[in-house]
Image (cartoon, grey):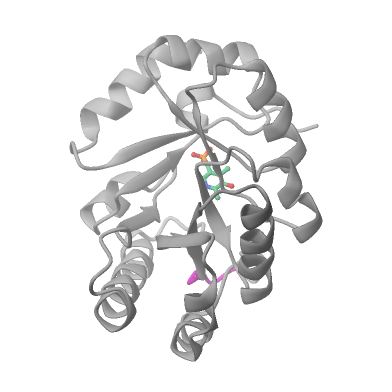
Amino acid sequence: MNVAHNLHIIKDRLPAQVQLVAVSKFQSEALIAEAYEAGQRIFGESRAQELKLKHEHLPKDIQWHFIGTLQTNKIKYIIDYVDLIHSVDSMKLLVEINRLAQKANRIVNCLLQLHVAEEESKFGFYIDECKAMLAQGEWKGLTHVRICGVMGMASNTENDEQIRHEFCLIHTFFQEMKQLHFAGDPSFKELSMGMSDDYSIAVEEGSTLVRIGSSIFGERIMH
Ligand SMILES: *Cc1c(COP(=O)(O)O)cnc(C)c1O
């Protein structure tokens, strides 16, 4: 794998306003360092303890994004330094992130993860559930989290029209919520959509953050 070369190819295809999250879950620190040397600064991880170790060992100007399912008892491993949590999928999780962020004396950036894919296994709020959560308003009292937008994954399918439709649902939801609840808030601006196989569609549908792993680092070796 030539990480620098792969990064270069992807960056060339991304419009200037779209940021690249290099998804380094299960990848070695040596490969992450290669991407860092090539200029990449935003990395995405899906396990809190793995992220903690990588954060300790790698350069301190890396912006670490958390993109996986986050259990409340694991927040403590990332709360001091995480730059953006993409995967907030319940009010309970948001409340707990807020509580620990307050203790850490930080305001932590979060995205609300939406479930729009057909697979049962994908996590996230259903759109109606997320609308109800925002309408209910309790989140407004959480002073140590900043809701910066939404994240979603499309179905794992060859059907590009379905993928496009699902990204479009996320974008429409984002715009509605921006008008209803975040009209005066410039921080609510991120649409985290698109992975190795579908990022070009996601970008066409308005993504501002693409999360790309295997096209940069190659296949993941699970452990
Ligand atoms: C693993 C993962 C990615 C990256 O997937 P690739 O297909 O390797 O690009 C993106 N987003 C999330 C939430 C992931 O878990």
Q: Is residue 219 left or right of residue 154?
A: right
Image x and y of residue 164, in percent: 31, 63
Image x and y of residue 129, in percent: 53, 85
- Is residue 60 or residue 156 the one in the foreground? 60
Image x and y of residue 26, in percent: 68, 30
Ligand 1 occupies quarter: top right
* Magenta highlight: main SS: loop
Could one spot residue 154 in this view of the protein? no
209 inside magenta stretch: no
For the point 55% across and 49% down, which residue is it? Answer: 106
Q: How many marks?
A: 0
Could one spot residue 179 in this view of the protein? yes
117 inside magenta stretch: yes
Query: If the image is split into quadrants, where does the C terminus sit?
Result: top right
For the point 66% across and 18% down, which residue is it? Answer: 28
Q: Which residues are magenta?
A: 115-119
For the point 62% across and 56% down, which residue is it? Answer: 102
**Vertical order, 156 against 83 (above or below):** below
Which residue sits furthest left?
A: 16
- Is residue 195 or residue 43 the one in the foreground? 43
Image x and y of residue 17, in percent: 20, 42
Q: Quadrant of residue 188?
A: bottom left
Q: Is residue 65 left or right of residue 103?
A: left
For the point 69% across and 64% down, which residue is it? Answer: 96
